[in-house]
Image (tube, coloured by chain):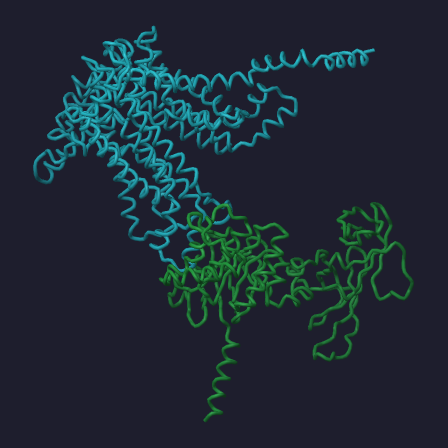
Amino acid sequence: METTQHFRTQAASLDMPSLRQPLRRVRRLFELEVLLPRLAVFLGAILVAGPFVATIVRSIVVDSTDSISLQNFATLSIDPQFRAAVIDTLITGTGATILSCLFALCLAWIVARTDTPGREWFDTLNVVPFFLSPYVGAMSWIGLAAPNEGLLNHFISSFLFGPDDYFNIYSLWGVTWVLSLFYTPYVYLFLIGPMRTMDPALEDAARVHGAGFWSTARYVTAPLMMPALLSGALIVFVTSSGLFDVPLALASPRGIHTIPTQVFALVQYPADYGRAAAVGVLVMTVTVVFSMLQRGYMKGRSFATVSGKGYRPRIFRLGKWRVVAVAFELFYIGSGVVLPMLVLILVSLSQLWTGWPDLKQFTLSNYDEILFHNELAQRAIMNSVIVAVLGATIGVVLGFFQSHYLHRGKSRLKPLLDAVLSLPLGIPGIILGLGMLILLIRTPLYATLWIILIAYIARFFPLVMRSISAMLLSISPELEESARASGATWLQTMAAVLLPLIKPALVAGWLMLFVVFIRELGATVLLYAQGTETISVAMIALGERDFALVATLAVVQAVMLGTAFLLSQWTKHSFVED
Amino acid sequence: MVNARTMTVDAARSEDSVKPFVRVSAIHKSFGSVVALQAVDFDVSLGSTVSLLGPSGCGKTTMLRSIAGLETPNAGRISIGNAVVFDSEQMINLPSERRQIGMVFQSYAVWPHMTVGENVGFPLKIRRTPTKEIKARVTEVLSLVGLAGYADRPSTNLSGGQQQRVALARAIVHEPRLVLFDEPLSNLDAKLREQMRTELKLLQNRLGFTAIYVTHDQEEALALSDSIIVMNHGRVEAMASPRVLFNNPPTPFVANFVGFDNLYDAKVESVGDRGDMTAFGRASPQPITVSVGGIILRCFWQGDTSLSRGMPVTLAFRSERVGLLHSKPGKSDSGSNQYEGTVEACIYLGKSQDCIVTIGALRLHAVGPGDAAIARGDRIVVSIDPKECIVFRRNTT
């Protein structure tokens, strides 16, 4: 009886395909498998397009008349201040790119290809500046190299000779120097992989066929490293040019402006949003062109230099030169991490900073003030933690579903969407903040913590999307398909197969977002209001009164970032052991 | 006077042909506590092809890379032609680029950022050859390896076989007297491998360079070499011509490597009389019987020393030389060892079938014709020709 029943229902369902088919199609739209990734991509597209469109519209609408014109662009083109800012940006951006590429090349070569003692430690230490805040870095270099007050200036003048304004950090050179220190890890991370995994036979083949050390470097090694180096260089140029923190701390006090600080000045009272938006449009255009250049360049040239088999790259015995290699490592890590942290700690322990630590005057009163009394600092720490934790969580969820759509979905629009969703990567924080401000200024979100959260996610979600994508690419879809074939639903497959497999990327992505959200300044500085200050904003506010309090808050922030760094290292190793 | 001059020329010529071109002596190399090469000695005469054959980890690639100067041995001496390129005592270690060699790498190592022509022309460019000459030479060599017209193509997106040809062209373009090959065919599929093997042999015959060839594939070594060096655990296990190695392997390890897949510990049961001296001036084989797995097997002892009853030996024979018969033939074929056994498993391979047969406690591999009706559980007669068996002395200590 049961069998006949079964056959009958099956026959019935076969009878009426015309009625069932559309219904099924509609229902399929609401299945989680389809819905969640699409939703994530849709949200991402809005987050990208919203500020873009708002900025463009604002730049061509004339305030008083509501008519459309290119007047803002016309005024910009003859504005001498803007021209000066462009030149200064080019100087610092180019300088930082060249210096950080040089640093990164040397550091990566030392770590990957030489027998320098302690190179495993240096490998980890070289990327520490990546986790520190550039604003804090700039503040600490004020402590180190401000004329008359800097620790290094004091040191040189009292122990050696000459005046105590040996270094002047308040200059374009200062900006370039600090930018270089902080962007070196970006290039380093690009280079270290290819340097480590390059098929050594490629170099051996040159040696065997007659090329000496320098010819091999010139004709084989250098050209093979070029794609990674140029990619890193492009990214450093775009992001360092758009960084607000460092020029704000080091150039603005002397009346020198780069494009980001110029935008900030335009939005201060009396604000000229139209002209600021015009700058924003120009910067966005340049950024988009650069990221397209980078994509196009990499497409043709990402050489598969890895053979999978064979020996590790040849390790060069440096002999006496090992001293030079270690000295260079210590110079970089000293300038990027040790000296800045040291001076911040010294300043935070001092009653009054005079450029030299006075052991008798050491006190914890600054910490007492920041942690237990100063309302602004307490509020800022709270706000930063809330935004960072919430934002990182949302960002990872969003990034996971977006990369799932891009690498597991079947849409034909995938390449286009991938390019669109990656756009915010190079957009300067202050330009995106400006876009968000223009977009949301008339909504209830304005002046809340939410607008900051949205801006953060809009600027940084592509970061997680990219890193999860890289992981998804390395995991064969067959692993999920076999779970489905074994009878698991999509949700069960996600929970039992995919999520455990990409856990390292999820954790790394979360920690990365936490770090950038804790320290972000450019995207915040136009969006905060009384009550929604973050740590970085509070540091600017405190900086007007007391350098010691700034240093103390900076140490507190550095502790949070350092914890995230240690966690990322620890999870990386424990996952590898798994 | 005239006579004397021709004499010296002749003497020089004969000396030249006797004197080895590459001479490797007493090479030691260790990586930390792992010994990769110990006391390796061999010579390669001018214009010949020598293979270093052995399983992975036997040190053959390390040896080749030491000749190339890509690895520095701890001790020993290597000379190429008249030049000592490495001598640990005299502290000589010529860098790779000054050893004037060509080399084909296992991963091909074709530079992805250069065109095919730039890859091939590199050794000439480094030697500051005029551009015009480079171009002509590259064209010539590319057509020699079957890649005429490829000079301006990018070297990415080439197939494995094409990359292999580019690597080969690059290794011979500057006419080195010595070309080193590091498992050059191991990344190709079986069919292409056979084709490239033949082409390589023809090319070597035509250009006459001396070649040292590393491989773990015995067939490749047999096909390409004038002489084969079998390596095992960093030592030279045997050195002989392909035919000798294939038919009369000097050690059980070599025997196993060249296809003697039935290898047993056995014991000498009885020793027969050695016949007269043969025409070749060597002692003729001594008929003996050995016991293995409960059966007695007749075979010949080839060695010069004599064996005695009870001595431990190793017995080896090839599975494809084992006869499988359904019924016992007449007495006429009694020269052969015949046993009744049971077929335990049979794998059909088309042309042939691979069988495992048990005779009492003895388990052996046998290859039967593909069309024979053999099935699991069949009672079957196994025949083993005494002349197909090799016996090695075994030290019990």
> Which residue is drawn at the image coordinates 49% and 77% (left, top)?
B16
The tint chain A carries is cyan
Query: Percent x, y for residue B38?
Result: 51, 61
B102 shown above or below A352: below
Nearest the eye: A570 or A437:
A437
- Residue at the far bottom in the pictured view: B1
Judged left or right of residue B11, residue A482 is right
Nearest the eye: B150 or B297:
B150
Residue A46 shows in the view: yes
B324 shown above or below A493: below
Query: Percent x, y for residue B273?
Result: 79, 74
Quarter holding the C terminus of chain B? bottom right
Residue B241 appears in which quarter of the rendering? bottom right
Quarter holding the N terminus of chain B? bottom left
Query: Percent x, y for residue B298?
Result: 80, 64
B177 shown above or below A187: below
Nearest the eye: A350 or A550:
A550
Judged left or right of residue A24, residue B141 is left
Query: Percent x, y for residue A550?
Result: 21, 20
Residue A393 shows in the view: no
Residue A435 appears in which quarter of the rendering? top left
Q: Which chain is green?
A: B
